[in-house]
């Protein structure tokens, strides 16, 4: 171990305080922070962004921004977007609504979007894209900038890789809002580091009011016993809910709960692009028994899903408890695991949710720069990253059934082709599962520099 420590100390480079654990990681760290490589990474990032932005004009009147805009417009004009058919309004505006003909997001989200409905659809869309880009830049600055502990070279290299991350393209394609949630989580962490728990709680409460699923991070606060921040989170949630009800109205606000069964319906759960645990299990049952299972099989599917979700939650809580009995979450290891877990535990989650994993990659990189992460955690994270970046695009290029229902295709096309179709549909979940394993090892493996090197 002493020899390993001497080798690591002798290979200090620009990633941070000391070299990455393991010879291979050290070489990657040195290479990635060389000027020519940084320039290459930046060029790749710019090319990725140029491809993304080139397709945006064709997306201005389509999902998901069209749905946001029409829902917020109906709300601003005094209607109830949770019970009003949005298709007539969409047709008048010349935007796509499709089968999801009701609002599906919390009322606070649409309330904040109301000012954009004062603009024409196209103008509002580009304002939304501009805001998303600013949010992304701010999130990357908080995660990889001076406050992260990384060197400037490492921060630039990591930011370039993050911009090239495939889910960023999906996020812009659907004009989604998960980058805003990423920014709020990053801001929450930086505020917690400064002891500003009221401000950090406001970030968590805002993220919850906008998208609901971040509420599961309250479990993280409970396990690490951040009682003061938990109290402030409750205060901000109550305050935000009261403001929303006051401005939106009680009836329209509570109407959101009417669409929850629709959002969690079997059609949404089994959707092939749903990367959540419940979606994966539902599709596996569907592959085996077909699209019309018996009541008994449906009950078994529910039991299996509940057991899997409780298992994920139990592993997350157990790892967090083992990480330490203090309120300090070193390198935000436990929070990283919880972020992966909330994606897996959400009834429905899509590939654009993976932008939240940029936080996890960032914390692992910071820990690696200080030799506080095991080799297996790094490798599992690399596998999760590579599945989305390399394996999935390759399989998609081979299996061309874009948008087709995998279960229906399996029914009529048995054999090796059907296996490829199923694999294509499930790769995103496998990527998420690899990230959960990486996060679990990130939390549970030794954290000190010497122990970390010995564990590799």
Image: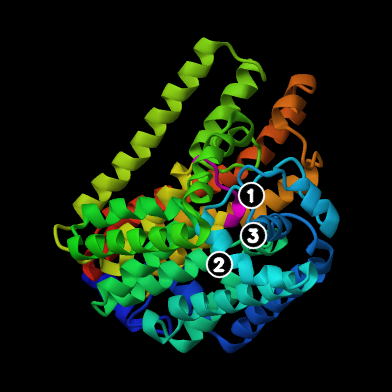
Gap in angstroms between the C-alphas marked 3 and 1? 8 Å
Secondary structure at badge 2 equals helix
Residue placed most toward the observer, 83 or 430? 83
Where is mark 1, residue-wise? 81
In the image, residue 8 above or below residue 168: below
Where is mark 2, residue-wise? 112
Residue placed most toward the observer, 52 or 91? 91
Which contiguous range is marked in magenta? 347-352
Can residue 7 be seen from the camera position used here?
A: no
> Label 3 neighbourhood size at 10 Å, few (<14), some (14-19), many (20+)?
many
- Quadrant of the drawing holding the C terminus: bottom left
Q: Residue at x 27, y 80 (%)?
A: 194
Gap in angstroms between the C-alphas marked 3 and 2? 8 Å
Asked whether disc 3 touches disc 1, contact meaning CB atoms under 8 Å apart, the reply is yes
Residue placed most toward the observer, 83 or 362? 83
Secondary structure at badge 1 equals loop
Of pointers 3 and 2, the one earlier in the residue sequence: 3
Q: How would you classify the magenta stretch by its main secondary structure?
A: loop
Where is mark 3, residue-wise? 72
- Quadrant of the drawing holding the N terminus: bottom left
């Amino acid at each position: 171990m002493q020899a390993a420590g001497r080798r690591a100390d002798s290979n200090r480079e620009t990633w941070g305080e000391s070299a990455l654990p393991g010879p291979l990681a050290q070489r990657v760290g040195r290479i990635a922070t060389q000027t020519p490589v940084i320039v290459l990474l930046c060029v790749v990032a710019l090319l990725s962004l140029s491809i993304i932005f080139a397709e945006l004009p064709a997306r201005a009147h389509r999902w998901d921004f069209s749905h946001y805009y029409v829902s917020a417009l109906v709300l601003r004009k005094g209607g109830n977007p949770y019970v009003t058919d949005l298709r007539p309004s969409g047709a008048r505006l010349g935007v796509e609504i499709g089968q999801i003909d009701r609002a599906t997001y919390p009322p606070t989200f649409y309330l904040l979007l109301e000012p954009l409905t004062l603009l024409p659809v196209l103008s509002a869309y580009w304002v939304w894209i501009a805001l998303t880009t600013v949010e992304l830049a701010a999130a990357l600055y908080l995660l990889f900038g001076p406050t992260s502990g990384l060197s400037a070279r490492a921060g630039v290299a990591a930011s370039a890789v993050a911009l090239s991350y495939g889910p960023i393209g999906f996020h812009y394609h659907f004009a989604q809002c998960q980058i805003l949630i990423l920014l709020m989580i990053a801001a929450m962490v930086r505020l917690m580091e400064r002891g500003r728990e009221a401000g950090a709680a406001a970030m968590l409460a805002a993220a919850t009011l906008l998208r609901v699923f971040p509420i599961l991070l309250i479990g993280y606060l409970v396990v690490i016993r951040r009682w003061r921040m938990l109290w402030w989170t409750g205060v901000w949630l109550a305050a935000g809910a009261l403001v929303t009800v006051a401005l939106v109205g009680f009836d329209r606000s509570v109407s959101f709960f009417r669409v929850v069964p629709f959002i969690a319906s079997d059609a949404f759960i089994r959707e092939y692009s749903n990367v959540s645990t419940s979606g994966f299990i539902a599709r596996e049952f569907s592959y085996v028994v077909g699209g019309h299972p018996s009541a008994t099989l449906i009950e078994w599917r529910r039991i299996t899903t509940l057991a899997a979700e409780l298992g994920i939650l139990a592993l997350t809580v157990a790892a967090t408890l083992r990480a330490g009995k203090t309120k300090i979450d070193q390198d935000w290891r436990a929070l990283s695991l919880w972020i992966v877990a909330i994606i897996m535990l959400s009834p429905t989650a899509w590939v654009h949710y993976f932008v939240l994993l940029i936080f996890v990659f960032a914390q692992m990189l910071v820990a690696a720069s200080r030799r506080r992460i095991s080799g297996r955690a790094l490798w599992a994270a690399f596998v999760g990253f590579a599945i989305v970046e390399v394996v999935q695009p390759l399989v998609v290029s081979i299996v061309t059934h874009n948008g087709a229902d995998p279960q229906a295709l399996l029914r009529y096309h048995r054999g090796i082709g059907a296996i490829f179709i199923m694999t294509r549909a499930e790769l995103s979940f496998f990527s998420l599962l690899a990230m959960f394993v990486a996060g679990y090892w990130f939390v549970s493996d030794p954290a000190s520099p010497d122990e970390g090197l010995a564990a590799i």
